[in-house]
Image (spheres, coloured by chain):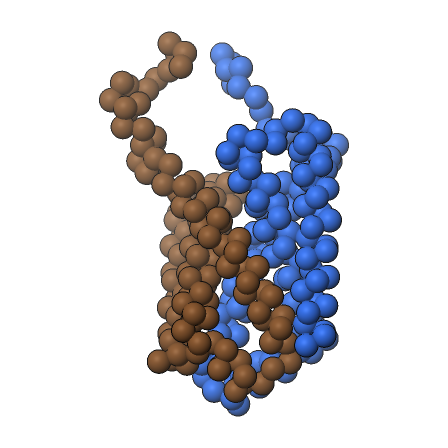
Amino acid sequence: MSGSNRPMSPHLQVYRPQLTSVLSITHRATGVALAVGTFFLVWWLVAAGAGAEYFDYVQAIMGSWLGLLILLGFSWAVFYHLCNGIRHLFWDAGYGFELETAYKSGWATVAGSVVLTAVAWAIGLAG
Amino acid sequence: MSDKSMRTDLGRVRGMGSAKEGVHHWWMQRLTAIALVPLILWFVASVAGLAGAGHAETAEWLAQPLVTIAVILMVVATLYHAALGVQVVVEDYIHHEGWKFCWLITMKFIFLVLGVAAVFSVLKLAL
């Protein structure tokens, strides 16, 4: 790396985890999880198209305790990736890079993902 | 731009970079992200409202013209966004050229199949 003054990426084994770095890797982790989760979204749509019998079968699997647990994690991952994604879009536009702002928007992402997940499940359980 | 740069004047003017695709990947990731903010919020709220609904009610909801259009837009944008995101993860972590190539092709085929299956299923109910 001689002759280069370019900044280096923080090394995981040397740097203490911080809110900003934890949220960053969580964005990638939820992104990968959601990419795998698209299979369940498409499975549900295919089941709806296939007819009542197969749809009931898939609904029963998704309505089981394991299915609901996965859906709970899936819904949180959706809202986390959505909130943090909006945070990234602001950065892309050149706003919010100050350390204090980055921490505020970070905590807002954490709070927003939990609140939106709770609201979605409140709608689901009420209906 | 330092005078140590190895880039030619023509390369700089074209602005396509070493991968010859310029900012297309980056830009499509952002465009799909912006589109997905309203689409995902609407879809999750709708599906939460449908929780526990049987096949007839779900199929009837999916068959409404505006719902059909929005669901197809949501699924296509989601799978496109996922393919772009997984591509970056594969390129970051898989260093063997052959395996990287295999993963990228397999991943893109899977998302394409999921997309066609989802669009077919929704249209089957709507048409």
> Which residue does the image show at 57% across and 31% down from the upper left?
A95
Chain A visual colour:
blue
Q: Nearer the viewer, residue A58 or B126?
A: B126
Q: Position of residue B90 (x, y in %)?
A: 48, 47
> Which residue does the image show at 71% across and 47% down from the upper left?
A110
Q: Position of residue A45 (x, y in %)?
A: 49, 74
Residue reaching furthest to the top: B3
On the question of residue B124 being in view, the answer is: yes
- Image quadrant where one finds the C terminus of chain B: bottom left
Side of A110 where A61 appears, left or right? left
Q: Position of residue A41 (x, y in %)?
A: 53, 68
- Image quadrant where one finds the N terminus of chain B: top left
Instruction: State whether residue A58 is above or below residue A123.
Output: below
Q: Quadrant of residue B112?
A: bottom left
On the question of residue B94 being in view, the answer is: no
Instruction: State whether residue A114 is above or below residue B61.
Output: above
Q: Nearer the viewer, residue A78 or B17?
A: A78
Please give the letter of the chain rendered in brown: B
Side of A77 where B119 appears, left or right? left
Q: Nearer the viewer, residue B63 or A97?
A: B63
Q: Position of residue B57 (x, y in %)?
A: 54, 84
Q: Quadrant of residue A102?
A: top right
Instruction: State whether residue A49 is above or below residue A101.
Output: below
Q: Quadrant of residue A120?
A: bottom right
